[in-house]
Amino acid sequence: MTKKERVKIVLEKLKEKFGKPHCALNYDTPFELLVAVILSAQCTDVRVNIVTEEMFKKVNTPEEFAALPVEDIEEMIRSTGFFRNKAKNIKLCSEQLLSQYNGEIPQEMDKLIKLAGVGRKTANVVRGEIWGVADGITVDTHVKRITNLLGLTKETDPVKIEKDLMKIVPHESWIDFSHYIILQGRDKCIARRPKCDECEINMACKHYEELQKKRAKEKK
């Protein structure tokens, strides 16, 4: 089975399972989404949503974050992990948006990734979710792990993984593909206890093929 054939099965099966996917982070404005995605690094979306639900009641604009002492931001986001670096980035990003873009989030990839705390993953999420624009494929920890298991890439660097996926995933599915893989990672392909036999896309999974071969060998 080719990589493109695997991708086709994955998209068909997970569309059937999940329908039209959407971002798991809660937000009301593009800026809130940007902050939420910055917070989501090495943190679960559930935890981020708990933190932002309270935080956004107090501050939710670039002006308000820029005016806050970084220590106050740290305190509000402490439970998301790496809170000092995230707080510094959120404050600096807010200042950059005010000084360079009148408080608005730029749509262009090259401008987004120059903002503090914003890499290609964050930019892809924001561009895809807010404007439906896909310059690339979001590669988070789920996508990194599962695309390797599926046999779609052998790379470990997110940028290289993204390049591999862009060659085999249809452009019109770049946004949905990441959402589907993330959802499946939470439901079946769980890192520490994967439910391989129950997985709806195991027929397209290189890891499952190897697992079945190993089981057959052990039976002989």
Image (cartoon, grey):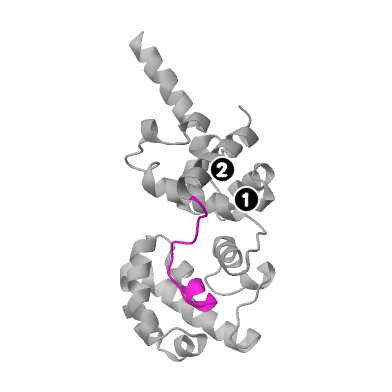
The residue beneath circle 1 is: 173
**Does residue 152 appear in this view?**
no
What residue type is disc 2 on?
Leu
Q: Which mark is residue 203?
A: none
In magenta stretch: residue 34: yes
Residue 72, picture quadrant: bottom left
Q: Which residues are magenta?
A: 19-35
Counting from the top left corner in percent of width and height, residue 82 is at 38, 67
The residue beneath circle 2 is: 11
User: Which sits in the foreground, 170 or 144?
Assistant: 170
Q: Are marks 2 and 1 in contact (CB under 8 Å)?
A: yes
Q: Main secondary structure of the magenta part?
A: loop
SS type, badge 1: helix
Residue 122, picture quadrant: bottom right
What residue type is disc 1 on?
Ser
Left or right of 169 on screen, residue 53: left
User: Which sits in the foreground, 30 or 65?
Assistant: 30
